[in-house]
Amino acid sequence: MNLKEKLTILADSAKYDASCSSSGSNRKGNGFGNTAISGICHSFASDGRCISLLKILMTNCCIYDCKYCLNRRSNNVKRALFTPEEVCQITVNFYKRNYIEGLFLSSGIIKSPDYTMNLLIETIALLRHKYHFGGYIHAKAIPGASAYLLKKLGLLVDRLSANIELPTESGLKLLAPNKNSNNITKIMGYVKENRSSKFVPAGQSTQMIIGATQETDYDIMTKSSMMYQNFNLKRVFYSAYIPVNKDKLLPSITIPPLAREHRLYQADFLLRFYKFKVEDLISQDNPHFNLLLDPKADYALRHLDKFPKEVNTCSYQELLEVPGIGVVSAKRIISSRKYFSLTFQDLKKMGIVLKRAKYFITCRGRYFINPTLFNKSFIEKNLVLEENTQNNLKKEQLSLFS
Amino acid sequence: MKKNNYIYLYNDNFLSLLTLIKTLWQNKIIPANIKNSNYQQNLFDAVINLSLKEDDQLIKDIQKYLSKEILKTMFYVYLSENPQKELILFYFFGYSVKYKNKVFYYRNITVIDKVLKICKYVSNESHKLKGFVRFRELQNKVLYAEIAPSNNVLILLSQHFKNRLKNEFWIIKDVNRGILSIYDKKEFYLVSEENVNVATLNSTKEELVEELWQSFYKTIGIKERKNDRCRQNFMPKKYWKYILEVSDEL
């Protein structure tokens, strides 16, 4: 098998991992390569996702038989295995040409978790020590591997991740019977305790598959929120389930639930940067996000009595609750209004999305449109209309109406 | 302050422009315009070249009495191709002296708003190109890339690659402006294309590496999630010509 064929097989198996960020690390490097704290996207794939890392598996051989996975033991697919030297050669040659920001190395479980982990360590150590590679490295921690191996790997990479795979314990038991969520949380706990500028400087992340089992958005967000709190995760990634296998335990969908995934990401940002709590957004009685409205607009409409807010006087936290005002805009408003009183025109200059914010704010006591139109049904109708003409709702959502 | 009808000229560099702007403010002159001395003059333009000595101290003074951020912002605007950039910088300098670092909060003032938008445009383009530059290895092992940016960001990119590819020889050519940045493992030099001749034949290994990258690129996209619009938003078509993996889709 030639190198190109190997690369194709092992990139194809790695592509379902959503994470591709290269941020959070600030290594100067002492020869070949460095990292940028903000991360850099080098290309965008045909699905619009950023490519910043060479995302590959060490091997797609696997002793496990997770139902949703292309590489499960019982699938009859072509298998390949990189040598450490091959991975280094490709990484170095791609990095030199500025195709990539670094390497994302994951793997199927070959022989045993420890054996696999050793293979990853050997490869990355070669890259760091023989090639003096100072670029970004994100590695998968293999659940079930020994702690001393985790320590070794963490000292070589910028970011580690262990995928929780499914939001609930029962889902994991059903679809990934060989995986044990304890092994995954053990890794997260260890990384959290030992994180430093030398050990996993860019922090850890994880990923969940959305729509392969029956869990609700409420289950998912509760799980995420718990993991952010307990393990200081940088990110939880949500990956709309894409059917690659046929199995009676798997849902029979043909189109991945992209609109749902989109809403989960929006809600995730609200948790991390806007100080929202899961209960503000959804509840056990109403456990799914509104697919027609983003979670913040939905929240604002359910709490219309708190609005409109006067931008010249309300608090930072209150500004964050306004649809169309993000973290950057809110900060700009706070610092500017010390020096002059803001008008709608000024807000526009500051990059506030007025077509959404206008329903929820006043400027110097003035409402943007006729104040009698400040009612739920009018605002809701317009927001839904606006979001749907934006054309950012993908095929899947449109099919809801056809 | 009195406004006059003259167009004041500066030499083709940032320091010369700053020196001129400072001198105009010191003499309370509002110019009709400020232009690079090599600009296309109109028959009726009344131009003045004060031939000021470039004031090396000025950079330090701006950092000290105004702020580093103001200096950086002005430099980024200077790198833009906005036809009014000199006059915009002239007024912005005045506001900076008045408000110091708080100048950035006065977005209600049109000139300041413009400066911030232009600055963001330039820094965004520079950031994007840090990812989109594609080198290829030449026969003499030099890494060579061509770009066609809307703004004059070559100097910003060079700074980036000087840190990143410290131990490589590399050349980046701005095709739009005919300037090359040449790095010799110590420093980079900006040179006009008339003064250099680069033999751009690829090294023998190049074809294989490019083929590997192309097949990786095609593989990594998920068919079920295909989204051309999203891709194009993040990676505007105007850059595609020089991005190896998409240049054949043009």
Image: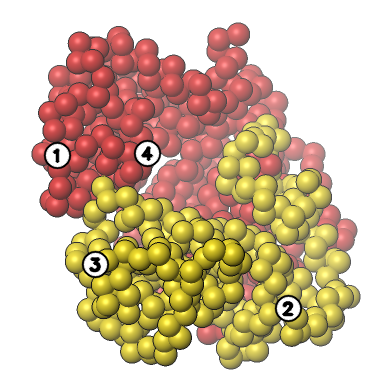
Residue plotted at (17% across, 36% down): A311
Which numbered disc, 1 or 2, marks the residue closer to the eye? 2
Q: Judge whether B149 appears above or below A67 on screen.
A: below
Q: What sort of colour scheme is used for the picture?
A: by chain
Which numbered disc, 2 or 4, marks the residue closer to the eye? 2
Please tell me if label 3 and label 1 are on a single chain.
Answer: no
Between marks 1 and 4, how big is the CA–CA gap? 28 Å
The amino acid marked with disc number 2 is Glu
Q: Quick one: quadrant of the C terminus of chain A?
A: top right
Identify the residue position indicated by label 2 in the image: B193
Give me the chain letter of mark 1: A
Label 2 environment density (alpha carbons within 10 Å; few <14, some 14–19, many ≥20)? some
Q: Position of residue A150 (x, y in %)?
A: 47, 65
Between marks 2 and 4, how big is the CA–CA gap? 50 Å
The amino acid marked with disc number 1 is Asn
Secondary structure category for the residue under label 3:
loop
Q: Which chain is red?
A: A
Label 4 environment density (alpha carbons within 10 Å; few <14, some 14–19, many ≥20)? many
Q: Please tell me the numbered disc located at residue B1.
A: 3
Tell which circle, 1 or 4, labels the residue nearer the N-terminal end: 4
Q: Quadrant of residue B154?
A: bottom right
Identify the residue position indicated by label 4 in the image: A268
